[in-house]
Every structure is written in C-alpha cells, then in structure tokens.
Amino acid sequence: MEQFAHTPVLLERCVELVGVGVEAARAAGSVPVVVDGTLGMGGHTEGILAAFPDARVIGLDRDQEALSRARARLEPFGERFTGVHAVDDELEEVLAHLGLSEISSILLDLGVSSLQLDEDERGFSYSRPAPLDMRMDQSAGLTAAEVLNTYPEAEIARILREYGEEREARRIARAVVADREERPWETSDQLAGLLERVVGDGPGGRRKGGAAQRKRSHPAKRTFQALRIEVNRELDSLSTALPAALSALHVGGTAVVESYQSLEDVIVKRVFAAGLTDQAPPELPVVPEEMRAWLAPLTRGAEKADAAEIERNPRSASVRLRAVQKIGSTPAPARAAGGRGRR
C-alpha cells in the first residue's frame, strides 16, 4: 500500500546493531524486548520484527497520525508489537506501565519524519505553503506561529542562534517582531518570504555582494529547523531520553541512534562518551569496578549512508549513526549524563 512506501534510513545496519542486544537477551534466556523510541511509520520496527521472530517491540511516537499508520502496518505481527502515544523521554513511565524492568535494545531515529515533511498541513517544509504548525503532536503545545507571534525578540534570536546555528539570528528576529505588528504570523510561505528578503537574494538580503555570495543552503532552512526544535522540545527530550534508555538496557543490550543535525549528534556523542571511558583518576593503579567504562562502542565514530543508499533515499544524506553496547551496570550519576537542554 502507498501509505507504507516510506523507506527507513540505514535499515539493515540498524537491524544488525539492534540484533546484538537481541542475541544477548537470548543468551540469558530472556525474551528480547526492543524499544523503537521514534516509531514514525514503523519501517524500522517492521524490519526488526521480521528479522527476530521471538522479539517484542514497543514503539513510541508523539505523532498520533504516525502511530495510527504504524499500527496498521504492523498489524500482521499481532501482540509482538505495542504502540504507545508518548515522547521518547517518557520511556521510564511507559516501561513501568507495561510491567517491564529491562529492555534489550533501543533505536532512536531522530528529527522530523517523512510523514511530517510530506504532509503540507503540518508546516514543516518551507518549500510549500502551509499553516505554521510544526508540532509533532498536534494535540498539545505551542505552534510555530504562536512562538513567532508571542516570544520576545531576544528569545527568538536565541532560538535561531542556538537551535538553527543561524548567523543572522538577530536580524531575522528583529524583522519577525516588526512584521508581526502589521500582520500575525500564520503560514510557512509568509515566513519563507521574510527570510528570502532578510538573508536571501531578495532586496536587502545578505546574499548580495562580497562574502555573502558564498554558497549556502536555502535561507529558510536554519530558521525552520530552529522553530521545529523549539516547538517540539527535541533537544530537551533527547537529553533526558538517552540516559534513561541506557539505564533501562540489560547488560549486553544496545542503543542505536540516528542523528540528522549536529546539535543532536553532539548530545548523543556526549552521553555515550560518559559511559565509554573509565572515570578513575589517572594516578590510580587499579580502576575500581564502579569507575570502569560500562559501555562499549559498536560503531567507529559516526557511520554515514553510502552513495547507493543516498541515491535510493536522499533523506539519508545527513544521517550520523552511533551505537553502543552496555557491558556493565549503569553508575548512579549516569542517568543525568546528558543534562537538560536549555529552553
């Protein structure tokens, strides 16, 4: 069916890495339990369920439309799949509700989903006119339009600078606030037009002349990314979810994360690094058990999609895949290793 045509990024590699945790559970005589913390349309989960007939998958997603489509797609697997309307940083509560104390693997495929990008009414794309919504869960939270219409100029500038890494954040924020005095922010093409005017090729845009002629991405890309992250609290969620997920893994379990922009990847790298290195002072002749590394790398740095996959699925071009295996007990402080993202 057309609604199931979505192609997951790095599917075979993700299934392989999740399988390391599945095999560890089998070796311990346990039923493998995998969490897909960003279910989307269920493509990765389908691959996992097909590859491991004894595994159970818990799929989390805040997007109720995605969850509905994934449930339809995964119906043939029966009770082996459980879909939950939740954000990935609610993992502890979800597992407690389901009576689960440990999991074998977790997969996080971060960022915006194909479903969200492709549905015009969601407002994630700057290439098509749509309401400025950008909520992954359309039942809760502020929309991107409400952010632009209510936040102070300084806060808008901070969001664009920190979440979009936009050099022209102050200029854009000033224009956003000035324009909303004349007309409230409502649509994606309205915002894209401002960005073209302020930092693009339009009159007064910063691409005109001198160093501004350097090649850069669409002038709306960074601002739309920043708004999406703010609306959905994506970095806050990841900073909470990933340490909790590592804590929930049994020894031998694996965490597999696909990131698509540097802010996400920095958090993943930092959280993993806290468990990949010994914490003892270098002068100690023997490292105490509680200070030893409790994670082992399954990837060498961040893996990327090859040219063949990028040609088949252009959205894989920016992926960075990192994975680790839990080899020891989680130290108590590790639960907060990622910290809370700033609002």
Image: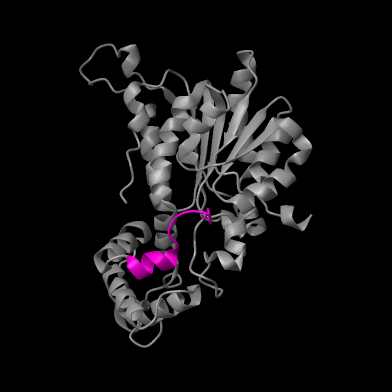
Instruction: Tell me what residue is drawn at x 44 percent, y 80 percent.
Output: 193
Q: Is residue 118 above or below residue 301?
A: below
Residues shaded magenta:
136-150
Residue at 41% of width from left, 70% of height from top?
Answer: 216
Judging depth in this view, the residue of 281 and 165 nearest the camera is: 165
x and y percentages locating residue 114 in the rendered image: 60, 57
User: Where residue 317 appears, x then y in whole percent?
Assistant: 55, 56
Q: Quadrant of residue 230?
A: bottom left
Quadrant location of the N terminus in the rendered image: bottom right
Residue 323 showing in the rendered view: no
Q: How is the image coloured?
A: one colour
Farthest residue to the front: give it: 139
Quick one: 338 or 131, which is closer to the camera?
Answer: 131
Above or below, 305 relative to 226: above
| Residue 102 screen position, x and y as percent | 53, 22
Task: Assess whether residue 147 is covered by the magenta stretch.
Answer: yes
Q: Taking the image as drawn, is residue 343 in sight?
A: yes
* Residue 192 x/y as whole percent: 45, 76
Q: Is residue 97 above or below residue 300?
A: above
